[in-house]
Amino acid sequence: MRSVLISVVIALCASPSLAGDDPLLARLAGDWIGRGLFRQSPEATPEHIYCRITNSLSEDGTTLTQKGRCAFASHTAAVESTLAAHGSGRYAGSGGGLGVASRAQATFDGTGTTNRLSFSAELTDTHSEESANATATVELLADGGYRLKALVTDKDTGETYTASEVVFAAQ
């Protein structure tokens, strides 16, 4: 799958018994603006990307839901995902991804540390039915924002490339 941007833009921290016990997860609730770069494929020239995202914490504090839009030169698309804390530093979720020429749905799971979440994702292009794998990190920044970096492995070449790197600031 050549055209994938993972829509997971949620940051979590380590080992809460419930996500609601996690002050970093609660801190991420709100409105965010993200700016960064996006690449469709390993050989593509990076494009600037701009996102407006709202992260909402569930009433019981165990799930973070994200909704918003991302745009780059030739495309704009809705972004939606949900991530749940499962305790002991484990997280899992799903969401709609976006790509220039295709749409992707992803499932993901990962582990958290004090200021970083690392996860793997399985993506399926809803148009071509092709699958791809990706890894991503979400790093909490000292200024209160967070950075999402997504790496995709090109199915044809086996080359791993940075598909997106976006820094989010509170709106």
Image (cartoon, helix red, strand yellow):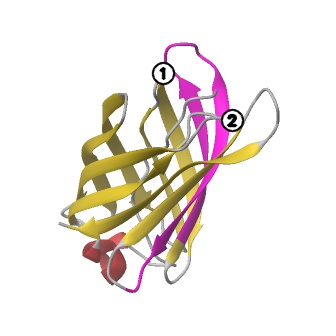
Q: Quadrant of the N terminus?
A: top right
Q: Main secondary structure of the magenta part?
A: strand
**Where does residue 51 sit, x and y in percent of width and height?**
30, 49
Kindly state the secondary structure of the residue where label 2 is placed.
Answer: loop
**Position of residue 4 in the picture relative to residue 158 (left or right):** left
Residue at the outermost top position:
128
Q: Residue at x 34, y 74 (%)?
A: 145
In the image, residue 141 sits, relative to residue 77, either above or below, namely below
**Where does residue 76 sit, x and y in percent of width and height?**
31, 32
In the image, residue 144 sits, relative to residue 153, either above or below, namely below
Between disc 1 and disc 2, whose residue precedes? 2
**Position of residue 17 in the picture relative to residue 4 (left or right):** left
Pointer 1: what residue?
Answer: 102
Q: Quadrant of the C terminus?
A: bottom left
Q: Residue at x 54, y 44 (%)?
A: 46
State whether residue 60 appears in this view.
yes
Q: Residue at x 69, y 38 (%)?
A: 42
**Position of residue 74 in the picture relative to residue 101 (left or right):** left
Pointer 2: what residue?
Answer: 43
The alpha-carbon separation of the residues under discs 1 and 2 comes to 17 Å
Q: Which residues are magenta?
A: 117-142
